[in-house]
Amino acid sequence: MTTTQLSQFGYGDLESLMALMTGDEKHGPAATSTLDVLWVLYDRVLNISPAGADDPGRDRFLLSKGHGPMAYYAVLAAKGFIDAGLLPGFAGYWSPLGHHPDRTLIPGAEIGSGSLGHGLGLAVGMALGLRAHELTRPRVFVLVGDAELDEGSNHEAIAGATGLDGLHAVVVDNASATHGWSGGIATRFDREGWSVLIADGRDHDALEAALNAPHPGQPHAVIAVVEPRDSPVARPAANVR
């Protein structure tokens, strides 16, 4: 099952939930760029629930994009993983909601997010660990920012994921990368044998289809484009529900 069955709030409540979080260094625009991807993952894709946050058979989600916690906390609150009453204390001294999620404090958080560029490598290791324990049903999803791909550790992880068909990388492309890639971000994954799809990062149906697309024998990358550009996936209106 997905977390849809356990929703306390809907997509339309996320903006209000994010507005409860105040203070410095919110990284609001960067967090907002991830909001639709996070919602689709938790509402339609991930097999995880608050009651089963420690279930060995659960899907794993890793937040690598370091400027995305506001959106992440809003979605976790909407889905019942954390109490929405915690949101106004975001980044406060006694609050469990830090600028980077802490896996020991936040139910459902699989890693302690921190330095940019570390999440994809951890996801590869997690997928390898699940395979070593013969846990073939759980999937690993990692959310990465396009600027993180400037970090060399990611390219080692991309090259080292051969055959890990339980691994899914979601790259939120908001045109913030410094260097860029000839032919676009998708080519970097494709050259290393990944299955790759590009989707409108605001279109929920397109994201769901891309995230759930079959990719036997290959790791899978979804490039979620969230800024207008000359691209067939950039559309003015999102398809949400």
Image (cartoon, grey):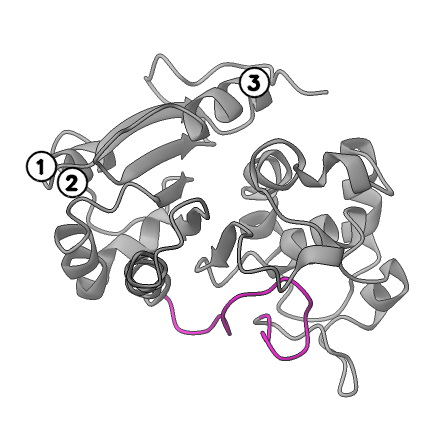
- Horizontal arrangement in the rendering, residue 221 relative to residue 91 (left or right): left
Q: Residue 140 placed where, x, y %?
A: 42, 50
State how far apart marks 1 and 3 are (Cα).
27 Å
Q: Quadrant of the C terminus?
A: top right
Q: Earlier in the sequence, mark 1 or mark 3?
A: 1
Please, what is the three-letter code of the amino acid marked with disc 1?
Answer: Arg
- Marking on residue 205: 3
Confirm or deny contact between disc 1 and disc 3 (CB under 8 A): no
Q: What residue type is labelled 2?
A: Arg
Q: In this view, does 14 lie above or below 71?
A: above
Q: Which circle, 3 or 2, is nearer the viewer? A: 3
Q: Is the magenta stretch mostly helix, strand or loop?
A: loop
Q: Of callouts 3 and 2, which one flags the residue occurring earlier in the amino acid sequence?
A: 2
Q: Where is residue 72 in the image (x, y as percent from the top left)?
A: 64, 54
- Give how far apart the Cα atoms at labels 2 and 1 are: 6 Å
What number is the disc on residue 191?
1
Image quadrant of residue 234? top left
Mark 1, Cα crowd under 10 Å, few <14 / some 14-19 / many 20+, is: few
Check if mark 2's residue and mark 1's residue have beta carbons within 8 Å.
Answer: yes
Asked whether 237 falls inside the magenta stretch, the response is no
Q: Could you say which disc has been placed on residue 188 in the image?
A: 2
